[in-house]
Amino acid sequence: MRATVNGETMELPEGLTVSTLLQHLGVRAERVAVERNGEVVKQARHREQTLTPGDRLEIVTFVGGG
Amino acid sequence: MDELVLGGHRFTSRLVVGTGKYKDFPTMQAALQASGAQMVTVAVRRLDLQARGEASLLHWIPKDMVLLPNTAGCFNADDAVRTCRLARELHLGGENPLVKLEVLSDPKTLLPDAEETIKAAKQLVSEGFRVLPYTNDDPVAARKLEDAGCAAVMPLGAPIGSGLGLRNPYSLQMILDQAKVPVIVDAGVGTASDCALCMELGVSGLLVNTAISGANDPVAMARAMKLATEAGRLAYLAGRIPRKLYGSASSPLAGVIGAA
């Protein structure tokens, strides 16, 4: 299944949830926030949302800034 | 106690500092501490999926400092609103977090886009954010942002990172005269005297990043800014003498020896 993660098109296993996507990418959920197709997915709902082909995901964190 | 009250938080320090452009995290941490700041800005960016085990910024920010997520790098209201929603999800600041709203117009001047900033501010206020908007030194834009329900207004002194200091003190005075929310000068400070000057005019606080992180000795500059901010605030509260064109003796004129 193809989806776009942080602007990059990726081939991902079928049936991933947001939670298992983060595991697949080696990302710790408590350090990031996730947006799926323009809407924030709250951490409590990471297990409930199953990805579909063509999804656009943003995985963000805090960095230094002014 | 002379406190700055902002969106439900009470601060004894009036200097807010950024966390960008430091050469390394230990220097940043030392500068944050030297600044005496109680609130620091952070940016929201895509996680680098290749960089495993990357050092976390938050690990280096003292735990008692309030985080102020910004929307730096956004050039339209929609991206700024999305960034704030992500920041709320990232942040343990509750459902009504403080956010620094910054919507820029072009990458060369980095000047704010007032129209998009006001649009984003209205949306964010309706979603419960406590919005601190970066804005031009334009009293009209500042009033509209205040009317939109922002918790403060943050006019620039000069373009971001320019270090030009306060370019238009008269516009700032107009903003101060009308504002019923705190006015914080965000951007343009170059050195400590700029902090003192802004504070002497009566602003409620300052937001400084590049002038500290880009100094030869960021830790020393952070302390200089802390002292200048405090000095300027004290001078404002003390009330300066009026300016006069001609001299006015400070010693008695009578009783000088040799007088007729």
Image (cartoon, coloured by chain):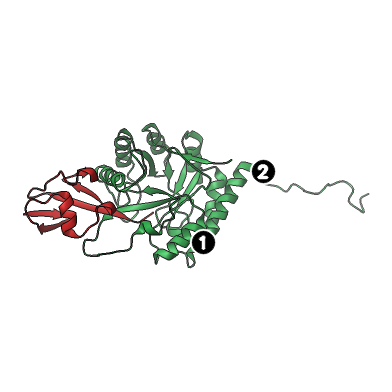
Quadrant location of the N terminus of chain B in the rendered image = top right
Q: Residues within 10 Å of mark 2 (few under 14, many from 20)?
A: few
Residue B25, x across and y down, in percent:
40, 64
Foreground: B206 or A11?
A11
Q: Looking at numbered disc 1 in the image, what kind of residue is underneath it? A: Met
Q: Looking at numbered disc 2 in the image, what kind of residue is underneath it? A: Ile
Classify residue B198 as left or right of residue B139.
right
Q: Image point 15% across, 53% down: which residue? A: A20
Q: Which mark is residue B221?
A: 1
Q: The numbered mark 1 sits on a residue in which chain?
A: B
Classify residue B40 as left or right of residue A13.
right
Which is in the foreground here, disc 1 or disc 2? 1
Q: Are marks 1 and 2 on the same chain?
A: yes
Marks 1/2 in contact by CB < 8 Å: the verdict is no
User: Chain B is shown in which shade?
Assistant: green
Classify residue B169 as left or right of residue B124.
right
Residue B203, x across and y down, in percent:
51, 43
